[in-house]
């Protein structure tokens, strides 16, 4: 098939890891006889330096004219001052998500047997972990009205019923193809938005997805249960803030945040795909960053935006095989680690051997 894919390498380790993800896409293109048109554009801090804005018009147009976007990472110390008028996160990531209408963040969490010892969690809690977070991405406290004076500050958290319904449908559709269980996280005992969240999810699941099991759990309890009984979870549905926190916590189950991909989806097949780790400026340009999160994000791109499920599975299996063979980056092993490029090459070679 023909597809237009926009690459936004971004900042820090972003260029290094997206380079390896593109190699795997090119390997898939070769093996399965696809035609991927890949276009690289500026985004994030580097775009601020070169154009004055993290999300320039050229990048906006490229994204809107593509079938999918693969993003590396944004931000770094140079642009971290909260007093700056333009920053990569707020005027970049948040603006991009709103502009492209991507409101559903999908984050799968799986453990690899070879990496269990890397996790700070006891091994007995880490077997058979296979969950998916569905996080609402364009509402809540991050997008609410903000006020700040020298003596007080406020952030408004607001959700509409429509916003809650659409993200609940995303979670439900994913759960239908899995173990048919949704855990919805809220703070309905004290927050009005959570009370609406709970009543809306309950009503919609009962009305449209009666075959699914729905449980509600408070955010404070969720942080504990995520570590004490992680294998019990299937699909976890959250608002923007709670999802941001819980997915980073869940990353500790896998042994390295560098292994985790994500997808940001809207109403159609278009999506923005990125590893969940940050720009890691402390290890940028050293060739030691783990590209697997970016590579697996490319796999999600194939699955969700291009509907190439077999090809997506090939990438996932190739990553698993390489790890099983002991090809590991520095974050995964203390000895005998390989470079960012070597890891990407190993995965690409596995694909080409099919």
Image (cartoon, rainbow, N blue to C red):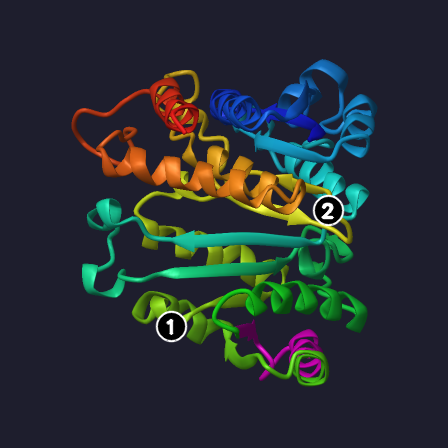
Q: Residue 55, image x and y in percent?
A: 75, 29
Quadrant hosting residue 224: bottom left
User: Does dot 1 land on a helix, a strand or a loop?
Assistant: helix
Dot 2 falls on a residue whose secondary structure is: loop
Quickly name the residue at label 2: 269
Q: Residue at x 69, y 43 (%)?
A: 271
Residue 266 appearing in the image: yes
**In which quadrant of the rendered image does the C terminus lie?**
top left
Residue under label 1: 232
Q: Which mark is residue 326?
A: none
Residue 14 image offset from top left, x and y in percent: 52, 26
Magenta region: which residues? Answer: 182-201
Q: Quadrant of the N terminus?
A: top right
Q: CA distance from mark 2 to mark 1?
A: 30 Å
Measuring from the top left, give residue 114's x and y in whole percent: 22, 45
In the rendered image, residue 195 lying in the magenta stretch gets the answer yes
Instruction: Answer above or below: position of 305 versus 10.
Output: below
Q: Depth check: 219 or 107 in front?
A: 107
In the rendered view, would you say 328 is above or below 206? above
Q: Of 287 and 221, which appears nearest the observer?
A: 287
Q: Kindly report which numbered mark, 2 or 1, lies closer to the viewer in this rendering.
A: 2
Q: Is residue 152 visible?
A: no
In this rendering, would 146 be left or right of 33? right
112 or 241: nearer the eye? 112
Q: Nearer the viewer, residue 339 or 283?
A: 339
Dot 2 alpha-carbon crowd within 10 angstroms: few under 14, some 14 to 19, many 20 or more: some
Of the numbered discs 2 and 1, the one sitting upstream in the chain is 1
């Amino acid at each position: 098939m023909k597809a237009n894919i926009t690459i936004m390498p971004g900042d820090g380790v972003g260029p290094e890891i997206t380079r390896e993800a593109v190699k795997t896409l090119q390997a898939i293109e070769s093996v399965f006889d696809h035609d991927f048109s890949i276009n690289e554009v500026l985004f994030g801090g580097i775009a601020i330096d070169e154009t004055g804005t993290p999300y320039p018009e050229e990048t906006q147009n490229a994204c809107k004219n593509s079938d999918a976007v693969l993003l590396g990472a944004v931000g770094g110390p140079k642009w971290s001052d909260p007093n700056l008028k333009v920053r990569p996160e707020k005027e970049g990531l948040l603006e991009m998500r709103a502009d492209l209408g991507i409101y559903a963040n999908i984050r799968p969490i799986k453990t690899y047997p070879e990496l269990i010892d890397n996790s700070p969690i006891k091994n007995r809690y880490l077997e058979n972990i296979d969950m998916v977070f569905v996080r609402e991405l364009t509402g809540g406290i991050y997008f609410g009205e903000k006020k700040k004076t020298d003596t007080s500050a406020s952030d408004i958290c607001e959700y509409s019923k429509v916003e809650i319904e659409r993200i609940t449908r995303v979670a439900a559709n994913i759960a239908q193809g899995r173990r048919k269980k949704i855990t919805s996280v809220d703070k309905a005992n004290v927050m009005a938005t959570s009370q609406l969240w709970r009543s809306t999810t309950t009503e919609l699941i009962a009305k449209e997805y009666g075959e699914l099991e729905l449980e509600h759990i408070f955010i404070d309890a969720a942080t504990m249960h995520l570590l004490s009984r992680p294998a019990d979870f299937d699909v976890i549905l959250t608002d923007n803030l709670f999802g941001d926190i819980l997915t980073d916590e869940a990353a500790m189950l896998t042994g390295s945040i560098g292994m985790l991909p994500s997808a940001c989806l809207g109403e159609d097949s278009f999506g923005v795909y990125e590893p969940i780790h940050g720009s890691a400026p402390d290890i940028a340009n050293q060739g030691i960053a783990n590209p697997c999160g970016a590579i697996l994000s490319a796999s999600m791109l194939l699955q969700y935006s291009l509907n190439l499920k077999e090809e997506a599975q090939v990438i996932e299996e190739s990553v698993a095989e390489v790890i099983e063979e002991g090809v590991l980056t520095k974050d995964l092993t203390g000895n005998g680690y390989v470079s960012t490029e070597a890891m990407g090459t190993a995965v690409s070679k596995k694909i080409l051997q099919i």
